[in-house]
Image: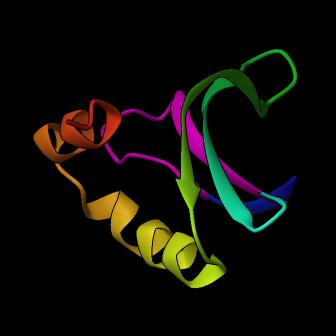
Amino acid sequence: MRVEGTIFPENASQVGVATFSQQNGSDHILRIYQLLFNNTESVYEPVKELAAFNFMSRRDLVGFLDDLPHLNGLEMLMLLNPL
């Protein structure tokens, strides 16, 4: 998987989000992982996968990544539970 980036919310210094992508055939998959700060090692470690999204093109994946930090909770819930 390719590391796409990290997001660290201003109001929660012990947690973060890491995004990874991979290509499977013509599909572009984005995986979002929760990070938790390990005080003993002084590093953030992945805890669990929060979501995975499938895109038809790399361009669509990158567009979603640009929007991701600005999505509100309701928008994310709708993305996680599509009709």
The verdict on residue 35 being magenta is no
Residue at x 66% of width, y 26% of height: 37
The front one of 51 and 83 is 83
Q: Position of residue 40 (x, y in %)?
A: 83, 15
- Image quadrant holding the C terminus, namely top left
Q: Quadrant of residue 31?
A: top right
Q: Is 39 left or right of 13, judged from the image as shown?
A: right
Q: Is residue 61 left or right of residue 80?
A: right
The image shows residue 54, relative to residue 57, as above or below, that is above
Q: Residue 16 appears at what percent x and percent y? A: 54, 38
In magenta, the rendered stretch is 6-22
Q: Is residue 80 left or right of residue 41?
A: left
Residue depicted at 61% across the width and 77% down the height: 57
* Front in this rendered view, residue 49 or 53: 53
Q: Is residue 60 above or below residue 24?
A: below
Residue at x 49% of width, y 67% of height? 65
The quadrant where residue 34 appears: top right
- Specify whether residue 21 is painted magenta: yes
